[in-house]
Image (cartoon, grey):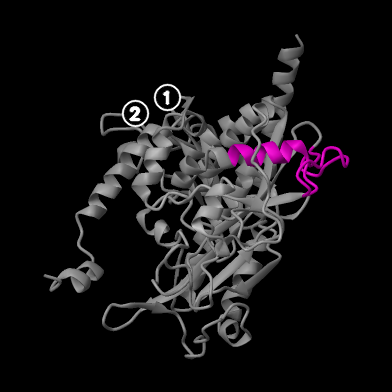
Amino acid sequence: MNQVVAMKKEAASDAEKREQVRKQLEEQGIEFLLAQFIDIHGSPKVKQVPVGCFDDIVEAGAGFAGAAVWGMGQGPESHDLMARADLDTFCQLPWKDNVAIASCNIYVDGVPWPYCPRTNLIRMMDLFACEGYLLNGGFEPEHFLVEKGPDGTLRAWDPQGIDVLSKPCYDFKGMSQTMDYLQDIIRFGNQMGFGIYQSDHEDANGQYEINFGWTNALHTADRLVRFRMLAGQTAAKYGATATFLAKPFDDKTGSGAHLHFHVADARNQENLFPAGSEAENIKGLGLSETAIYYIGGLLKHIGALTAISSPIVNCYRRIQSGEFVYSSASGYTWTPSFASYGDNNRTQLYRCPDNNRVEDRSPSAMVNPYLFMAAHMAAGLDGIKNKIDPGEPIIGENVWNLSYDQRRERGMLLLPQNLLEAIEALEADEVVKSGLGPIADEYIKLKKSEWGEFMKHVTPWEVDRYLTML
């Protein structure tokens, strides 16, 4: 009887929420809705429907041909993907104010579809919650504003010709010509509920970063996808292209999507990362055993995680070993290539700026946040359950200045240096694959094919270096 009562209450709550959303759409003058989901790459896919079809996309969903979308586990003979809107995610588009967008979960024949990245993340969040945990976080997406010259070459968007410093990070002049763009991003993003609290000119010419507020894993993934949509539309207004390509220029730093995160108690939302006593502060960072073991799980599975955090060939231009070339125009790549953790030190893979959170500096700007957060929880939970010791933290040292042997002696593994190496690590890692469900096999197959396609192409560097060598 109690279960029946609970189900009736939930149905009443959903009905009430639906009417609240319907009223909000009317008050905002919404005429059209975008039912949006993402493919295996993290690329948003949409159907536009009139607002009169609100009930349709909430109940049955908008129909899509799954074989027309990357990595959805379907062929042309398969039944339709039905994208059902999440009532908590309806949001007016500030740059197109007669349109609202809703993040959707995919169903096939009325059953949640396990190849949907968002649906899979919800599955992992439920498993994480059953263990008593909730993952919270916020991304810091970096991106470039670029344009193509008359000869087709790519260059940083610099209409005034003033963004030319060799160390342009935080530069006023470089940022001044993009203030209107960045103000639009902040204004629009906060209208969409992102909680943006700062923006800046980043380490490369034409590169910018936005910092979000924190929320749970699902909604922070939603925010990153919507931010990319927002940036693309806003940049076009100014005659630029916003790109999240990890390394568009070989002589400039790459773009990451650093994740600040902590694990909370699923019941009361209490942050579990700060050490409750000096006895629990086992590594001298003010972090609890839960935090330390979570980091231990991440470090143990870093090879497989890199396949998710750096999902395309170009990402590995950003992850350099530091043994041969590690300098950018401003002096650093800012991308860890060795697996380490420690204090408030940006040469770490996992940086601890305070005892209430850890920064994961590995994700590329190209990351699919739904897959990454799911894999993150799988690896971290393995660490907590098996009490995986991450070793001693690096405190007060520049990891980039350590020799290869010194890094190895301290247990710092070199991150995969190309996509194939990372995918092979994922293929061998049952824990991280479990975080992806059946998406793992689809992802591995797709990325091996992507690597094969890449290897068929001859680069200008190869021609320049080897054409007349012999």
Magenta-colored stretch includes residue 276: yes
- Residue type beneath disc 2: His
Picture disc at residue 441:
none
- The residue tagged 1 is 109
Q: Main secondary structure of the magenta part?
A: loop
Q: CA distance from mark 2 to mark 1?
A: 7 Å
In this rendering, does residue 100 appear at all? no
Q: How many marks?
A: 2
Q: Earlier in the sequence, mark 2 or mark 1?
A: 2
Residue 72 image position (x, y, % from top left): 38, 37
Magenta-colored stretch includes residue 265: no
Q: Residues within 10 Å of mark 1 (few under 14, many from 20)?
A: few
Residue 309 relative to residue 348: left or right: left
Q: Decide which of 208, 64 is in the foreground and name it.
A: 208
Q: Residues within 10 Å of mark 2 (few under 14, many from 20)?
A: some
Q: Are marks 2 and 1 in contact (CB under 8 Å)?
A: yes
- Residue type beneath disc 1: Asp
Residue 15 image position (x, y, % from top left): 67, 32
What secondary structure is marked by label 2?
Answer: loop
Picture disc at residue 79:
2
Q: Quadrant of residue 381?
A: top right
Q: Quadrant of residue 440?
A: top left
Residue 424 image position (x, y, % from top left): 37, 39
The range drawn in magenta is: 269-298
Residue 390 image position (x, y, % from top left): 64, 40
Q: Decide which of 35, 277 is in the foreground and name it.
A: 277
Q: Decide which of 258, 199 is in the foreground and name it.
A: 258
Q: Is residue 279 above or below residue 352?
A: above
